[in-house]
Amino acid sequence: MTKYLKPPLSFDAQLLQLEERGLAVPDRRMALLYLQRVGYYRLMGYLYPQRLQQSDHYIAGASIDEALTLYEFDRCLRELVLEAVGHVEVAVRTSITHNFSSAYGPFGHHVAGNFSSGPEWHREWIAKVRVEVERSREAFLTHYRSKYTDPPFPTVPIWMASEVMSIGTLSKFYSAMHPAHQKVIAKDFGLRSPVLKNWLHFASVLRNVAAHHGRLWNRELGVKPLRPHGTAWSEERTPYSTSRCFYTLLVLRYLLRYTTALDLDWRDRVTKLLEQYLDVDHRVVAIGASSGWKSHPLW
C-alpha cells in the first residue's frame, strides 16, 4: 500500500512545475487564468496527449496553448452535444408517454405487470420515479398535489411523471417495456428496438459526461452505440470507431431528424466547429473521424 503524500500547490507553483517538465508557456497570464478558473487536474486531460509515454515530462515542442485550444474546442462541443441530446430526450419522452398511456392509462406505470422486467425491477424503478416527482417543483405537480387525493401524490399520471424523469430513468422505462410497445416507439425513430434501447442508454451516459463538464472530444466512453442494420452504417461504409466522438455525432445527427430541432442548422454549426479545430491530422484521428468526414452520407 502506497500513501498519497502530494501537497497542494499554489497556482504559480503549478505553472512552474509544468515548465520544469518541459511544457512551453507563451502567455503566463493566460495560463495562470486557466489554472485558477479551470483547474490543474481538469487541464491535465488536455495536456496528456503531449506527454512522453510513462512520464510526467512533455515531448519536444509541447505547449500549454495546445491544451487550452483543445479545452475550448471540447467546451463548445459539449454544448452542441447537450443541445442535441435535449431535443432527442424530449422527442423520445413524448413517444414513450403517448404509447404507454394509450395502452395502460394514466397510472399504468404503477402496475408491475405492464412491464417485462419483473416486480423487483419495478419496485426499484417506481421508487426512483417517486423521488423525482417529489423533488420537482413543477407547477403542474403542485396543482395535482393540492387538488387530487385519489390516487394521492406522488402517484401522478405518466404524462406528468415522465416530464420530470431523468434521461436515465426514461431509458430504463423504455428498456423494461414489453417488446411490442418498444417496436412501436422505435419505429417513430426509424430504428429497431434493440438499437433505440442501446442509443437511449448511451445518450444518458453521454449527457452525464457533458453535463458534468467531462472531456469528450477524444474520450472512449464506457458504453458504445450500436451500428444499425443497413448499408450506410456498416463498418465498410462508415469506418468510424463506435467508441469515439465522431460516431456519437453521427448518432445524434440521425436522431435529430426525428425531433423538432433544425437538424441541418445543428449539423452546420458542428461542422463549423470541427473545421476550426480539426486542422491537424492527429486531432482528426483522436476524435475518431477521417479526412472525408464532411462528405460522409450520414453527415
Image: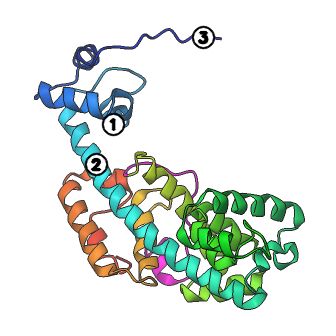
Instruction: Work out whether residue 209 can be spotted.
Output: yes
- In terms of sequence position, does the residue under pointer 1 or pointer 3 come before the other? 3
- Label 2 and label 1: CA atoms lie apart by 10 Å
Q: Give the residue drawn at x 13%, y 27%.
A: 29
Coordinates of residue 151 in the picture (x, y in percent): 79, 75
**Viewer-nearest of discs 2 and 1:** 1
The residue carrying mark 3 is 2
Discs 1, 3 touching: Cβ within 8 Å: no
Residue underneath mark 1: 49
Q: What range is drawn magenta here?
A: 217-239
Residue type at the position of mark 1: Pro
In terms of depth relative to the viewer, which is nearer, 211 or 289?
A: 211
Return the x and y of residue 195 as percentages of the image width and height.
Answer: 61, 74
* Mark with earlier residue (2, 1): 1
* Residue at the spot 42% in from the left edge and 78% down from the top edge: 256
Which residue is pictured at 62% across the width and 56% down the height? 135
Q: How many numbered discs, if any?
A: 3
Q: Helix or strand or loop: what does disc 2 sit on?
A: helix
> Which tag is nearer the camera, tag 1 or tag 3?
3
Residue 230 painted magenta: yes
**Magenta span contains residue 219:** yes
Q: Which mark is residue 27?
A: none
The first of marks 3 and 2 along the sequence is 3
Gap in Å between the C-alphas at discs 3 and 2?
36 Å
- Give the residue furthest to the front: 146
Is 3 left, or right, of 38 in this rendering? right
Q: Quarter of the image containing the C terminus?
A: bottom left
Helix, strand or loop status at disc 1: helix
